[in-house]
Image: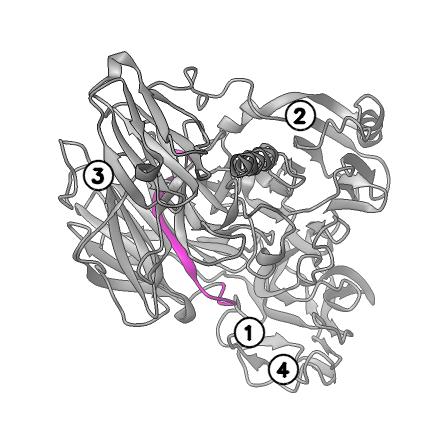
Amino acid sequence: MKTVKLLILVFLAALSSTAQVGSELYRPVFHYSPGYNWMNDPNGLVYYNGKYHIFYQYNPYGTQVGNTSWGHAISTDLVTWEEKPVAIPAKNGVQVYSGSVVVDWNNSSGFGINGKPPLVAIYTGKSNVEDQRIAYSNDEGMTWTNYKENPVLTMNNNQFRDPKVIWHQETQKWIMVVSIPAAQAINFYSSTNLKNWIAMPGFGSFGNRSNFWECPDLFKLPIDNDSNKMKWALVHSVSPNAQYFLGNFNGDNFTWENTVPNGIMIDDFENNSYNNWTTKGTSFGNAPSIGNGTVSGYMGKGLVKSTFDGNGSKGKLISSDFTIQKKYISFLIGGGYNPNGTYIKLVVNNEPVRTSTGMNEDLMKWRNWDVSSLAGQTAHIEIVDSMTNYWGHINIDHIVQSDVLRDNVNSGQIDYGFDFYALQSFSDIPNGRRIWMAWLNNWSYAKNTPTSPWKGQLSIPREVKLETHNGLIKLVQKPVEELKVLRKNGLSFTNTNLSVINNSLRTELNNSLSNPIFKQFELKARLAVADKSGFSLKFKKFGLQYSEFIFDFINKEIRFNRSNSGGLAGDQLFGQVQVAPLIVEDGFIDLHLFVDNSSAELFSAGGQIVMSNQIFPDKISNKIELTALDEDLVFEKFDIWRIGKPDLSPNIISEKNPLFSIYPNPVVNGNGMTIKIKDEMVGKVSFKLFNASGMLISEFQPTSNSIIIPRNKLATNKGLFFLKGSDGQTSQTEKLLVLGY
């Protein structure tokens, strides 16, 4: 009797713990996170038979990375997700690293049965080496069988991972892209059956070379929704986010369509001296530096780096005079964000008229000064380093006058935040949409995020498009339309002053501690830049705690600061100010912001600029505050909605137990468990019992409407189990808690 009472107390404690899962302080409301344990990269995103499947890197046994297996969740609407048992567990010393899933419609692999196409997973097996393996499922991803001839592709090294496989319709073959991380390269392979692979020409190393290249993806998209104008996109992650290349792919070779910008060259720094520049101090040395692995994004071989004597040195470069002849002066810039310490400036009549600084990164990017109002005047450029801290340096290359804005051609950065990694797009979405998700985290601090009993979440789903902006083709991201179902009550303003909106947010809406209406919210706004300086948007605010976006119209920057946001704010990288370009189109800027309990995702310029970040505020920090940087300004449109779970989700099954019911649950004595099958389903339902790590324990098909399974036949150990029943059309999975005798 004492044992039974103890078990009942244990069960009640388990129920209490379970009841809290999903209601924790930082638990996301509209982002996917597992109920328990560690997750990272999304894997195998696929759409099949009306369901979106996400698989992901998962540790079934704890909240730190390890025992890497594939977790699994499904949705019918991209909004509400249902967690499923572990799909592919680590086994026999082989961990299941990242990969992809395809629907083998033509059964080229031979894994299909009963005329139904199999789902085939292609993943990296991690042991002392990394190799590529496959597994297949004939029950819509619920159970998986590893191919007996694994691995299907090897290189005999530990830098060979993250395969993404697509079907290339034009050549009727499968294409695999897989990363060679340390070499900063993407390998290509082809196959007709998903088992035997042939090497093809690879791609790399271009653009951002500041870290490992991982998690590649390859797909084709129309330009400006014109199906007669198609272009291929090759994307991959490079910490802390990702980059893309646009070009052609003929089934054998991917070609990046890159061009060099034209214009009047002020200096490309390809000579072995500074030519007509005057040097002061020691930080720039006596000649341009030769590029190396610490800096990327420069053109040619040479560039300006103010680290000749390390970050502790200071100095200045002063150009000779030149005449401003074009609309823009453009240049590549990298290094620290120090507006008053490390910067490049344009000087006219002994007065600085334009200034730019870095973005706390050594990936160099184009910056443009509009100098149309200065045409015909004499000017010079100064490059200054007066800082000695960690980011106390500046990198400059390829200064040119031009009549068009300079930007990366057919390539670019996918996200400017610190928490958007290992993105992967869904395969087999039938209407041509390209939707992807990413791990909303960063390896630099992922293990320290203050969440429990889980660690890790995914970004909101985003639709990916190719659009033409300023004459260049850009990859843009837009929140999927399905997210609109989350909108609750809110406020809407048209042609309204910022001060009026801010006052309404503080008075008309109840932002009190007891009723934080905008704890989770969506915000959309559009406003003219005109001659204003910009504005600040603080959110998740209470007292001195807040996160903040600053939209700087003068320097054309968006700055994000979460150093006052609460948990993890003391981490050096987490608290670092982030900077992204502020793109003005036709005199206007736009923003679209999603804020959840522990994240903020900002979209601007129609999705050309995105910043994705985690935040960890206290539960009382829920206020919103708008502040003009100088005088008041007018929003053409400002809409804000409270976000909550949809009132009616397609994922909610109206009939809770469509096939069977079980009792008792939990199992606490030797009498075992009874399965009650609906009368009309007798003889049609087959069952599979899995443990918490996804291992198949037993399978059976009852011939009566009721079956009793004794405790000693049910499972040899206590713990959490999953019982799945299926009649071939409908499936039902129930969690089963076995506590003991």
Q: Indicate which disc residue 294 carries.
A: 1
Q: Is 209 colored magenta in this rendering?
A: yes
Mark 1 residue type:
Thr
First along the sequence among labels 4 and 1: 4
Inspect the image, locate mark 2, and give the three-letter code of the amino acid beneath it: Trp
Nearer to us: label 2 or label 1: 2
Residue wearing tag 2: 641
Q: Are marks 2 and 1 in contact (CB under 8 Å)?
A: no
Which segment did they paint magenta? 208-226
Residue at 86% over, 39% down:
631
Magenta highlight on residue 66: no
Q: Is residue 364 above or below residue 40?
A: below
- For the residues carrying marks 4 and 3, which lies nearer the camera in this image? 3
Within-10-Å neighbours for mark 3: few <14, some 14–19, many 20+: many
How far separated are the C-alphas under marks 1 and 3?
A: 45 Å
Measure the C-alpha gap from mark 4 to mark 3.
63 Å
In which image quadrant can residue 740 be found?
top left
| Residue tagged 4 | 274
Residue 76 position by quadrant: top left
Name the image quarter holding the C terminus. Answer: top left
- The answer to whether residue 246 of the structure is visible from this angle is no
Distance between the alpha carbons at the discs numbered 4 and 1: 22 Å
Nearest the viewer among 369 and 309 is 309
Amino acid under label 3? Pro
Local SS, label 1: loop
Percent coordinates x, y for residue 663 in the rendering:
41, 24
Q: Which amino acid type corresponds to the residue marked 4 in the rendered image?
A: Tyr
